[in-house]
Structure formats: structure tokens, C-alpha cells
Amino acid sequence: MPEINVTPKHLTIALAGNPNSGKTTIFNNLTGTRQKVGNWPGVTVEKKEGRINRFGYDLTVVDLPGTYSLTPFSIEEVIARNFLLDETPDVVIDIIDASNLERSLYLATQVRELDCKVLFALNMADLAQARGLKIDACKMSELLDVPVLFTVGNRNEGMDDLLRAAIDLAESTAPLPRSRRVKYTHDIEEAVGRLRDFMLNQTDGVLPYAPRWTAIKLIEDDKIVKERLIAAVPDAGSAILEASRDLRQHLAARYDEDPQIVMTDERYGFIAGIVREVQTSGTRQRVDLSRSIDLVLTHRFFGFPIFVFFIWAMFQLTFTLGEYPVQGIEAGVQLISEAIGGLLPPGALRGLVLDGIVGGVGSVIVFLPNILILFLCIAVFEDTGYMARSAFLMDRIMHLIGLHGKSFIPMLMGFGCNVPAIMAARTLESEKDRILTILITPFMSCSAKLPVYVVLAGAFFGARAGTVIFGLYLFGIVLSILTGRLFRSTLLKGADAPFVMELPPYRMPMAKSLLIHMWDRSKIFLRKMGKVILLGSVIIWALSSFPRDGSLSRDYAAEIQQATAVAEARKAAAGDAASREIEETYSETVTALRRLEKAEQTENSLIGRLGRFVEPVFAPLGIDWRGGVALLCGFVAKEIVVSTLGVLHAVGDSEAKGALEKALVEAGLTPLSALSMMVFVLLYLPCLATTAAIRRETGSYRWMFFSVGYSTSVAWVAAFLVYQGGRLFGLG
């Protein structure tokens, strides 16, 4: 008999929940590395979904943005609600923080009102138990008429039961329960019923959403629902909106309060009753571990020094621990270079492959371990809950200088990449605060600048490299705060708003979740490697190799031929041990001659002419023309600074480890000029992607050009003070 190909049935599962409820941890547990990350249609908020095959079903799991409600005040709330209403997933799993039941149930009651298939996952059940809280899941399921399960996301407990329950609910043919939802006061229920009946009569039942839910939203004066209603039933829409407006005015006069506030109070009253029925506290007082830790980590005097130590340790670990795998990658790049060099004859193709591709990309890819360690540390801060504490600690300092405290949250994200950090500023309520945060965020050292720091600090500061890199990051934070104070007093005057931020409980991070976070961010670096950096390296090689006018001041080919003849003659007259020593000397001589030949060719090339043109701008900073060209190329992506230096210093065919660092030292760069260059890289104009994000998020070319001009001016002045000030004190 022929084989029957049975395609698994497809189901879509949406994960909803509050921020810090463990929703993303559960998403990572369910989907692992089978995730696709993009943006929601029409917006730049990150969208995550994963495809898995479990229990004979093809499942798409969608991780909705974390929200506290479905009231469309923020873009995250709009996205979450629109997905549930428009995409109609087969099942919605609402992740509830079991240790904070009352707060989490507000979103749960709103999801319940959507008339979709929903089940509740009481996550962090172990934390609730540690706090002496007991929750009767069966009682909650009975009262709300929804399935309720316990999970412990960071231990991967309850995941299979959760998926089975979701599949069973999706396949259930039982009618949706409608009787155990929030019951509002008599006047509100009467108004909802009247408006629902009026809508059904006016539209013959043709409505974009469920009639009762639509009526509730219209009485709450929901702008988006009103727009959707007009678009769906334009003829009857005006009459329905007029009727809803009359009912709102009647209720406002009845309660002397906006109906939306009254209905919110009713929901919280319903939730309070549920909590009293299903949750009991243990007779024994439990020690709240998170509060105990916060007594130290958020202490008024000790908290900030501890935070500074953690940041210092992160960069010290990034440099010292990352050095070992870097050596292995360097050896691999060297083997590739030697193999290609032995296959290709001298000429333009050999130069393109060795100097352009291997020298350019190889100069940057060796720093992948440093990038991975940095992102791993950031993931640890996020997953343990310490990232929120660091924002809380910095808020005190930022308020002292009059800057909005919430601004430090996007700034912290800037350690990874400035583009999503700038996007995160949209959560700020005030337009002035949002623009101010966008302008100062590029001063935060993103991961793309780390390879530049590692090369220069490793070459010139040795064991102190980690501390030097930490100092650069700290200097960026300080300068961004001072810039914020300046702009707040001049361009963007306004009072800073109070800062309210939830401090989630401390959690033990899961290795799987940490690796997923680290890999998601590192993929951006690898994509740049295969596209922007590769293309940039080839272009830089071409500009540094042409025109080939043959006007070199020395005949390097003849000198190499002569050195070869001398070496062969000496080896013929020497023993085996001496022959090896002669071979090493010969190899070093030929390498030096080829590097001199390449340097002279580069100076006469197109990029050499560009370098001499910009050299007067960078000379006061202690940066030669090659460094100046590399900095100009860094506008596309900061990693290209390193690849450009690799191409210009002709390290592609070098057989020595740490060839770029040695070439920089031989080129006459000093520790002081290296520090000046690092300061300039820290502060000068953002990369192309960040510049585009500034334009998009501010909606103005004016702010984009201002950001580019201001940051580059500050970078030049700061680097000038470092270099010239150092020379003044005899440090050059």
C-alpha cells in the first residue's frame, strides 16, 4: 500500500502576560532555538514566534509584548490586543505571576472578556510558596471557568502539561463560557446591554468584534474600537457612537466619575473577591529573599558602588576570559591565510583575498568571543532582575541633575545596540523626554565599538585593558548625563517626571534562556560580518590598492629576491639548527619588506590621498591618516574601524598572532594616541543604522543632523583634551 502522508494539524498559541511574569522564559522553554525574531507589521517593536511539533501538532507560539492591561495606552498594549482580536489565535495562554496574583489578574480578566479560548498558567509557583502563599488552582478554575495550571518557568516545570492543556482547549467543541466574567454595577450593565442591543439592531449583527466587548469599549471611549467600528459599518457607525456618547454622559453624571475609571474599579473589586476565595497566606512568616538582597544591592550608600563593581567586573571578564578563545580564532585565521597564500600566486587576486577578505573580516571575527561574553553578562543582569535595580540606582543620580529617570532604561540597552535602545525611548510619555533620551543614548558604548577597544587596549595597556575599557563605558555614561542636563536647561526645557519602576523578584537564570538571549544578539554581529563588514573590507582594499602606478621609491621585489638568495646560501653552509634560525630571520625580513611595500603603495592609493586630505583634522588628536580613514569608514558600522585598520596595515598575510596590534605599535601609535582614538570612537557620530533610527523615531532630519554634528564635535574636543593634555603632563 502507498504511504499516506498525514500533515500535522496546525495551531497558533499566543502567550500574554505582565512584564516580569516569566512569559519570555516560558516561550524560550517551549520553542528553544526554533524562534524567528522580526518586527510587528508597521512598527519596530520586536516580534517573537517559534514553530514546534509536539503531541502530533504543528504549533506556532507567539510571544506577545508584556503588558499590564489591554487598554490601548502604549504601543505594546495595542499590538497585544490587535493580535488577539484580529489574528484570533486558537488558544491564549495568560502567564500569571503567582506571587503577585491581584496585579496579574487585571490583564487576565480583560483577556477573559475577549470571548477567546484562554487558559491561565500560574507561573513562579515556587516563589509564591516561598512567600507563604497558597493558591487553590481548582477553585480558581471553577470560579473563572477556565483551565488553570501551575508552572515554574525557570525550572522548565509544567511545560508539557501546559501544551497538552492548550491543545485540548483548542480542540474542544464546548461553547465558550460567558457567565463568569466581571459583573459591573446595575447601571453600567444596563448601559452595556442597551448599547449592545442597539448595535445589533443597527448593523444586523455585523460588527468587527463581539457585541458585548464592543459595547464595553465604546462606553470606555476606546479610540481604536471607535475607528474600527466606523470603518466596518460606516452607515450605522455615527449613530452608534452618538448613542455611546449619551450613555457615557449619563453614567458620568450618575457616578460623578469617568465611566472608564468606574469600570476599572469594578474589575479590581471582582479580582479582590477572586483572590480572597483562592489565595491564603501561611501562618508562618516567610523571609522575602528579594527584599533581603535589595537591602544591600539597592542600599542608599552601598548600592551604587556595588553596581559600579559589577559593571567593571563585566568588562574585565569580557577582556580577560575572551582572550583565550580569541587566540584559537587567530590561529584559525592564520591557517586559512597560509593555505590561501600557498595556493594563489602574487597579484591582485591574492591581495584581494588575503588583505581584503581575510585581513578585513579576520580582524573583526576574532572578537566574537568578547561579544558573546558581553551579551551573556547582560543577559544575566536581565534574567536575575538586577537590570531593573541598576536603573533604579542610576535614577537617583539622574534626578540630581534634573534628567528624567526613565531615560536610563534605554541607555542600559545601548550597551548591546543603540538601535533598539533608541526605539525603547518611545515608552516615555513626554515628547521632550523622548527626544532628549534619543540624543544622549548614542554616547553609550554599544557592542560594535568593543572590537576597537579590545584591539587598542590590548596592544597598549596590557593587564589594565579591562579597566581602561570600563573607564570608557563609564565616561560615556557620565557624558550622556551631563549632555542631558545641558539640553534640559536649553533646547528641551521641562520638569523631569517622577520615576516609577517595578522591581521584579530575583530569579535564578536558566542556562538555556541565557544562551538563547546571547545568541539572538550575537546573530546581529555575525550578519554584519557576512554583509556590511565583508563589503566594506573589499571596498577599502580596492581603494588602498589602486591606482597601481609602479612609482615605488624602492624595488621591493629585488630586495626580496636578494634576501632569498642570501638565505639559501647561508642555509647551504650551515647545520640544521642554524638553518631553522636563518629561515626565521628570512621570514621576518620578507614580511617586513612586504609590509613596507604595502604601506608605500597604500600611501599612493586613492585611500591614501583621502587620508592625507583628512589628516590635518585628526593630527591634533594623535591619530595618523590611516586611523582617520578608519574612523570615517566607521560611520557605516563601528566594526569596520578594525577591519579598515587590518587592511591598511596589511595584516591579512601576516603569520604572527596579534598581527594588527603589533602593526599599530610599529606604525608609531602610542598609548596616549590609542586612548585618544578610543575616546573618539566612543563619542563620535552614530553608525548608519543608528542615524536612521534617530530620524525615524524623532520624525525629523533636524534632530538627526544635530545628533551627528553634536556628537562628532564633542568627540573631537574630548579626544583633543586627552591627547594634548596628556602630552602637556609628559604622558605622550
Image (cartoon, grey):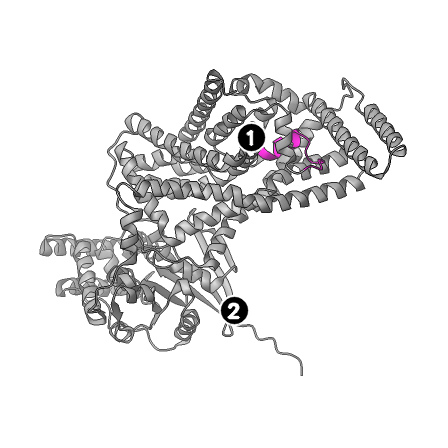
Residue 654 sits inside the magenta stretch: yes
Residue closer to the observer: 245 or 322: 322
Task: Evaluate if marks 2 and 1 touch, with contact meaning CB atoms under 8 Å apart.
Answer: no
Residue 150 x, y percent position in the rendering: 34, 70
Q: Which residues are magenta?
A: 642-656
Q: What mark, if any, has residue 628 been given in the picture? A: none
The quadrant in which residue 63 appears is bottom left
- The location of residue 321, given as percent across then percent down, is 53, 46
Q: Residue at x 52, y 27 (%)?
A: 677
Q: Horizontally, is 87 left or right of 69 in the view?
A: right
Neighbour tally class for label 1: few under 14, some 14-19, many 20 plus, Cα within 10 Å: many
Answer with mark 2 or mark 1, whichever residue precedes in sequence: 2
Q: Disc 1 marks which residue?
A: 460
Residue 342 colored in magenta in the image: no
Q: Secondary structure at mark 1?
A: helix
Residue at 60 percent of width and 42 percent of height = 366
Residue 537 on image: x %, y % = 64, 35
Crowding at dot 2, Cα within 10 Å, few <14 / some 14-19 / many 20+, comes out as few
Quarter of the image with the N terminus in it: bottom right
What is the distance, in whole Å, between disc 2 and disc 1 at their CAs? 53 Å
State the residue position of label 2.
53
| Three-letter code for the amino acid on which mark 2 is drawn | Asn
Say what secondary structure mark 2 lies in.
strand
The picture places residue 422, in percent across and down from the top left corner, at 41, 40
Residue drawn where x is 74% and y is 25% of the image: 597
Q: Nearer the viewer, residue 507 or 352?
A: 507
Q: Is residue 259 above or below residue 470?
A: below
For residue 44, say whether it is visible: yes
Question: Hey, what amino acid is under mark 1?
Answer: Phe
Quadrant position of residue 103: bottom left
